[in-house]
Image: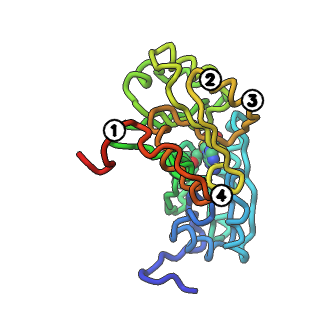
């Protein structure tokens, strides 16, 4: 079926489109992603891209370029150069990355290498796990009563170490809601830093693993208990960790539980005592 409504861009031979695949659920692809999947000769995809999404590109060769967090960046260079090679061979190349390609996904580095090699590119944004994954868990990443800002941080740097360059006291002071990518390995360090900087041990925390997929799991816990609870529940990455009172909204907004027949746990979890829309 042709896509209606617009002159959809054509993926030309020798081009690379860097495209976000969203957090998992294929329904969270953009129409530009779908348009790209239909035209690609080659799809190079990451570990976090759900394989079902590749079914939308049956005509294309599918190349897995999975990388596990913390591995040296040499592999990254190989992936970038592979993209250059494929483009130079005259392929229509779709580089598919989990979430949004420019959010903690090294999309900027790949794009830069392509441009440095004279390969023309297009960037197709995607729904980032730190937004869409939380929405599937029933957590609004901003909520008027809770936060006027949100901070997205990565839990470890390129070498796999806890991010020493992050100013945790400043983040703890300045951001009511903190969304942590790649945070599972160093959650003890991170939660410790936040509490040392004055965040309460009782502050709500949610851990959302394999968000938006059939395997999605959500743990509601607190800064003080999250390490023990993650361990007790046996939660594994990939996970988004959300710190802040926005997590409480899940008590009224867990729409997946409600679709499965459960009643909302609390219609007014922030205790406003008045209708949600009133000023
Ligand atoms: N570009 C991606 C992020 C890549 S970094 C994006 O915009 O979403 C990889 C990290 O993203 C994972 O360690 C995890 O923290 C998070 N992530 C990606 N997909 C996820 C999912 N389906 N569920 C939970 N976390 C996810």
Of the image marks 4 and 2, the number of the one nearer the N terminus: 4
Marker count (numbered): 4
Q: Is mark 3 on a helix, strand or loop?
A: helix
Of the image marks 1 and 3, the number of the one nearer the N terminus: 3
As drawn, the label of residue 83 is 4
Q: In this view, does 33 lie above or below 46?
A: below
Asked if one can make out residue 107 in the rendered structure from this viewpoint, the answer is no
Of the image marks 1 and 2, the number of the one nearer the N terminus: 2
> Which label sits in the foreground, 3 or 4?
3
Of the image marks 3 and 4, the number of the one nearer the N terminus: 4
Tell me if label 4 and label 1 are in contact, CB under 8 Å: no
On the rendered structure, is 252 left or right of 13?
left
Q: Residue at x 41, y 42 (%)?
A: 268
Q: Is residue 157 above or below residue 5?
A: above
Q: Residues within 10 Å of mark 2 (few under 14, many from 20)?
A: some
- Spatial distance from mark 1 to mark 3, Cα to Cα? 33 Å
Q: Name the residue under label 2.
A: 225
Q: In the rendered view of the protein, which quadrant contains the C terminus?
A: top left
Q: Name the residue under label 3.
A: 232
Q: Residue at x 39, y 22 (%)?
A: 173
Tell me if label 3 and label 2 are in contact, CB under 8 Å: no
As drawn, the label of residue 272 is 1
């Amino acid at each position: 079926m042709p896509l209606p409504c617009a002159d959809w861009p054509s993926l030309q031979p020798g081009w690379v489109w860097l495209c976000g695949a969203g957090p998992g659920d294929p329904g969270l692809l953009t129409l530009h992603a779908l348009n790209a999947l239909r035209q690609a000769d080659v799809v190079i995809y990451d570990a976090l891209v759900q394989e079902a999404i590749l079914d939308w590109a049956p005509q294309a060769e599918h190349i897995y370029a999975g990388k596990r967090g913390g591995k040296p960046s040499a592999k990254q260079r190989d992936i970038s150069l592979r993209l250059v090679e494929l483009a130079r061979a005259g392929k229509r190349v779709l580089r598919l990355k989990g979430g949004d390609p420019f959010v903690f996904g090294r999309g900027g580095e790949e794009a830069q290498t392509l441009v440095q090699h004279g390969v023309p590119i297009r960037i197709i944004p995607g729904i980032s796990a730190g937004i869409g994954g939380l929405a599937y868990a029933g957590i609004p990443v901003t909520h008027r009563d809770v936060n006027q800002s949100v901070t997205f941080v990565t839990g470890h740097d390129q070498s796999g170490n806890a991010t020493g360059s992050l100013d945790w006291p400043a983040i703890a002071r300045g951001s009511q809601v903190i969304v942590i990518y790649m945070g599972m390995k160093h959650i003890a360090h991170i939660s410790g830093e936040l509490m040392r900087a004055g965040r309460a041990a009782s502050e709500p925390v949610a851990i959302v693993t394999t968000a938006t997929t059939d395997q999605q799991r959500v743990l509601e816990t607190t800064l003080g208990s999250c390490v023990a609870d993650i361990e007790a529940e046996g939660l594994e990455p990939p996970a988004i960790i959300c710190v802040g009172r926005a997590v409480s909204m899940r008590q009224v907004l867990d729409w997946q539980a409600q679709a499965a027949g459960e009643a909302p746990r609390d219609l007014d979890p922030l205790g406003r005592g008045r209708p949600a829309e009133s000023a």
